[in-house]
Structure formats: C-alpha cells, structure tokens
Amino acid sequence: MIRQFELVDRVKSYEIGANEDALNRAYVFSMMAHGSQIRESGDPYFSHPLEVAGILTELKLDSDTIVTGLLHDTVEDTIATIEEIKGLFGPSVARLVDGVTKLSKLEQKSAGKHQIENFRKLLLATSRDIRVLLVKLADRLHNMRTLGFIPSSERRTKIARETLEIFVPLAERIGMQRIKDELEDLAFTELYPDAKNTIVTRLEFLKSQAVEEEIIGSILKELRQKLEAEGLKIDLSGREKQPYSIWRKMQRRNAEFGQLSDIMAFRIVVGEIKECYQALGIIHRNYPCVPGRFKDYISTPKRNGYRSIHTGIIGPKQRRTEIQIRTHQMHQVADFGVAAHWQYKQENREEAPSENQWVHELLDILEHTTDPDEVIEHTRLDLFQEQVFCFTPKGDLIALPRGATTVDFAYEVHSEVGDACVGAKINGRLVPLRTVLKNGDQVEIVTSTPGVPAPEWEGFVVTGKARSRIRRFVRSKQHSEYRRLGEAMLGKAFSEKGYDITKTVLKTTLGSFGMKELEELYLSIGQGNLMASIIVDMIVKGEKGGKLTHKEESVAENAKFANYKKSIPIHGLIPGMAVHYASCCHPLPGDRIIGIQTPGKGIVVHTNDCETLESFHEMPERWVDISWDISSAKSTEFVGRLELVLANQRGGLASLTTVVANNLGNIVNLKINNRTTDFFEMSLDIEVKDNKHLNEIIAALRGIFVVSSVTRAKQ
Ligand code: MN
C-alpha cells in the first residue's frame, strides 16, 4: 500500500500549492470510514481508494481529484455523508465525490437495454466536470486489475464486457490511451484467454527472433544516426503493439501477423513541431515510403486531440517499419488525453479551459465517429449519437433526441415555457421554431403570455412530452371546430333539400345513433363519421316533414352548390364538404392523393407522398380515401409548384421562362428563396393540366444548362 507521506509527496512533486492538509485528512478519513471492510482479495478495503488515488497521481491530477479518489467510495459504502465531506473538504470535493457516487449507483443498476439510458445519465453527470469521469476510469482500472479475485466467473465476465463496451471507448474518446490499453488488455485476458495466450506467445516468438537477429537494435541505431547527423535532439524508442489491437485487426482483416511492423512501431519524440517535420524529411529522404501509410495528425488532429505524424517506410535492414513522430507535449496528450491539460495547467500555471469548454469538447468528441483506422467500432457509445445536448442561457444541459427542435427544447425546460414559446434564438441568433438543434447549441426561448401552442408544431416536434402537450391542446380546439363544422354542414344539407333545420326535430333522431346531446351529433358529422345527407333523409322520409318548413329561395343556392360539386374532379368526397388543394404539395390530376378533414377548410387534398401527412398519422379519423376523376379534370387548370436551383447567369431566367412557355405552362408565381453569387434557389408556380404535363416541363427544364436542379415541391 502507498503510504500517506508517499502519496502527498507525489502530488507535491507536480502540483504547485498542493493541498497537503486536505490530502492527509482525506487519507485518514477514508481509512477510518472503511474501517474493517475487506475486499474480495482479502486486502483491507481502504487499499482500493488508495490505489485509485495512486493512479490519479500518475495522471498528475490536482489535489481535489486525488482527495476525491481517496473518498470516492465512502458515501456509498460507509456511513459518511456528502454533507460531512462538504464540511471537511469543501464544496468542490463534495461535488466531485457526489458525481462519482451517482455514477457508481447507475453502474450497479445498469443491465441490458437500460444500460444505454444509464450511460446517458453517466455522461450528463460527468460532463459537468470531467474529473468525475477520470476518477471513475481510475476506479474501473483498479477494479479490473483486481478482477481475478472475484469468485463468480459470471460476474467477472459481466464486468469485463462492460469495460470493453463502455469504459474503453470512453477512455479512447477522451484520449486516455494508456488507461484504454490497460483496460482493454485486462478485459481481453478475462474474456478471451485462449486468443490472448496465442497472440502473446506469437508476439514473444517474433520478438525473440528479432532480438536474435539484432533487428530492433540496429533499426534504432541506424535511425538515431541519421537523425542526429542532422543535428536533431531526439528520444527514440520502439513500442510493442497491444495484443488486443492485434487480435481485433486479425478479426477485421482476417490477417496473420508475421512482420516486425505488425508487432512494433518506432517512435521519435522531439522538442518542437518544426523538428517533427525535419525528422520526417530526413526519414523520407533516406528510406522508401510505403504508400498509404503517411498520415499527418499534427496538421489535422484526431477528434480526441491526438497529434502525431505516422509514416511507413522500408527501413533499415530492408524491414517494413512504422514510425510515429511527435513532440513531448503531443506525447503526453497521446498518453493522458484530457488529463494532460490539467498537467499543463500545473506545470505552466496556465489557465485551464473552462468547464463549459470541456463539455463542448467532450460533446464534440462524442458527436464525431471514430476514424475507420481506430480499433473501436460499433461501440455502445455510438448510440449516443442519437442524442443531442444543448444548453440553456444559464448553462444548464438539456439532452434531447436527435432531430429535436427549439420547441422540443422549450417543452423540455418546462411545459409552460413550451406553451408560451413564440420564438427562439440559437447561439444568440433568431431562428425559426422548427430549427433542428445541434450539439452544443445554446438555446434561448422567447415567450409571450398567455401562451398557446400552435397546431403546426405537432408536425415537427420529436419528443413525446412536446407532442402530447400540443396534441391535447389541439384536440380541444379541434373539438369545437368540428362541432361548428358539423352544425354548418347539417344546415347546408337541409337547405340543399329545401328545408330549414329545426333543433326539436333533430333531437328526435339522436336516439337512433345512441346519442344524448345535439353537440355529439354535430361533432360526429364534423368529423365525417356521420353523413349530413343521411340525417336529412331520415328526417324527411320519416314523415316528420310536417314539422319542417320548405324554403323556396334555397333552390338557387342548391343549384350553385351542385355546380360546385360537379366541378371538383375527385371521387370519394364527403358530400357537402368543401375542398382545398394543399399548398404544401400542390396535388395535380394524375397524382395519387389523400384527403384530410380540416376544420374550417373541409377536405384538404394532399399528394400521398406529401411530408405533411406524417403529422396526421395518428389521426386516422381525419383521412379520406379519394382519387381523381380524370375525365372531368380536363377543363380545369391546376397549379404545380417546382423547386429550382438556377445558375446566376445572364439570360438564365429568360431561358427558363421560355422553356416553360414552349411547353404550354403558365408561370403564375415566382419566388427566390435564397441567392448566392453563383446560384438562385427559387420556387415556381406553374398552371398545368395534370401531373404528366408538369413532368414534361420538368424534363424540359432539366435539359437547359442553367438549371442545376429541379424537383416538385413536397413540403
Ligand atoms: Mn471504487
């Protein structure tokens, strides 16, 4: 076990102003708190937090983190409380210990599919302060080192698997290469002992062969000579590849390993970036390059901050040799990832990036997929790409499903904020409410009271919370609209037959539909469940005519209505209902169409691939099956809408309109939606006979070179 003064000395060796007092007290506090508890290994429990703290000193983390390492299991496993820790070690340590404790609790609960959700929380909790995550990784590392003491093989397997699936990718994404390698190796040993043994044996063999032939030594010697001859000061070393990464490579490529370059890479470490390129120049001048092996991660670092130059050469002794070139600083980052930033802070007394910046960087890392080169693929972490993390102006983190809009954000903050939302700003700029959020966006919701959700929001929100809230509101609104529509339709149906409507008579029919109130009848008609004409027939034929008043003047009205009906070239309409053509998709005769009952508008006709229809998927009662009556459609002109991208060139618009005119189309509206120096994006409304006609125009437009794209509008 590390002794108290050793631990303190270690921290003092790298941290200026290390909190010696807190370290000493934490050591004693943890030892007392864990008391006589023992580990599976038979060691006193206290050895575990102590080792964790030890690992954290190797990462050169600050006193608060080391203290947290010592205390990390006290709240969960002993009678100590967060309040107590806050009193003794201050709020910052208390916050860190609390974070680690929460993670440990989630970890225990995590199993199967819940693991994903838990892990999301894990991320949320940790991303507020990445040191929590570092302590957790150190904790996991020590538990993996002592995994062999756990008697149940089932439990060992579970822990090892979880390590590979969750902790390894996490360590990798934040650049903690050294911890990642060790975790991977320990899990590999537990899960695939035979594979591990085979590879290790083979590695040993290849290495001993190389040693025997003095290959490694002479490569090192020759490289050093060439580089130093040109005045470079270098650290040169050979690094064996990890058995697990060799195994993964063999699995992926179905390859064997036999060459030196398969088992070892050489590393040149220099002082400055320009020396990296000098070294690269020397290497490439002296040895032939292996094509496709050169990568410059200095000019374009990996997402996790990794920087180095990689190259492959036919090196000394005609051996294929892989070489990495980097500075000392890059080397530190390559091993310790984010922890290295704390090290710089200690060493150079520089400002560390703010916490908020850490969150951004972490999220950025999570958002981008790993290089294809990298060993880890299809990790569970990728599932988090289905989420997007945003901030309130105060910096609170809000997690939403990918595709979420500002309205989802508003409802996630509070349902009243959602209802009252009238506008949104992303990163200070006003955006449309339907804007899809991206990771790291700071979102400010503009509200007005009393708030009323808009029905069209339902078309773009993705969270259940927002949707149900909007729907509930829309339902109640719809209800009264349908009721109103039903009453109007019934009135119309009566006057069509030449009668005045009377409520007294209407009430007599309620019983035959199992209804009690007139309201229900209106609603049912408005929603299209009952046909107004049937009600009228029932009343008229059911001899109740005596009580009805005939209405002469309605005959004219009647005729007008009949005409109107005839002019709609659509089969399957509910009699008496008005028809509108949707402005989103501009249906044309020949298109496959669907009707949607819409309060105040009757039936709105959409093409059946219109994107707007998605918002009606859960309202089957509003769908009406309709089709074109092509024979009667001929006389009518319809309007189709096109979306075009047109090169910004002299005469471009003229050639466009000429083509439309030559094809017997009539442009009735033209709108430029976006213009750059090179292109116009525009929508064009054209009167046509049917969809075939429009398609002919589209084909003709595609034939002129100024048109870079043309499609029918679907939304
Ligand atoms: Mn622990």
Image: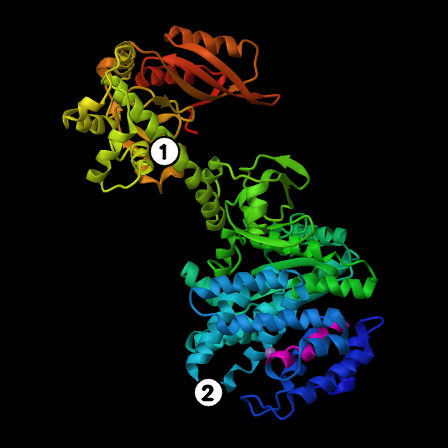
In the foreground, 444 or 12: 444
Q: Nearer the viewer, residue 81 or 11?
A: 81
Report the residue marked by disc 1: 483
Seen from the viewer's position, the closer of residues 351 and 225 is: 351
Dot 2 falls on a residue whose secondary structure is loop
Q: Is residue 339 above or below residue 639?
A: below
Identify residue for label 2. 151
Magenta: predominant secondary structure element? helix
Q: Where does the C terminus fall, quadrant-wise?
A: top left
Q: Quadrant of residue 128?
A: bottom right
Where residue 304 appears, as percent x and y from the top left, is: 62, 56
Is ligand 1 closer than 8 angstroms to the Cβ of mark 2? no
Figure quadrant of the N terminus = bottom right
Position in image of residue 83 (x %, y %):
70, 76
Residue 354 seen in the current view: yes
Instruction: Give ligand 1's quarter of the image.
Output: bottom right
Q: Say if the magenta span includes residue 179.
A: no
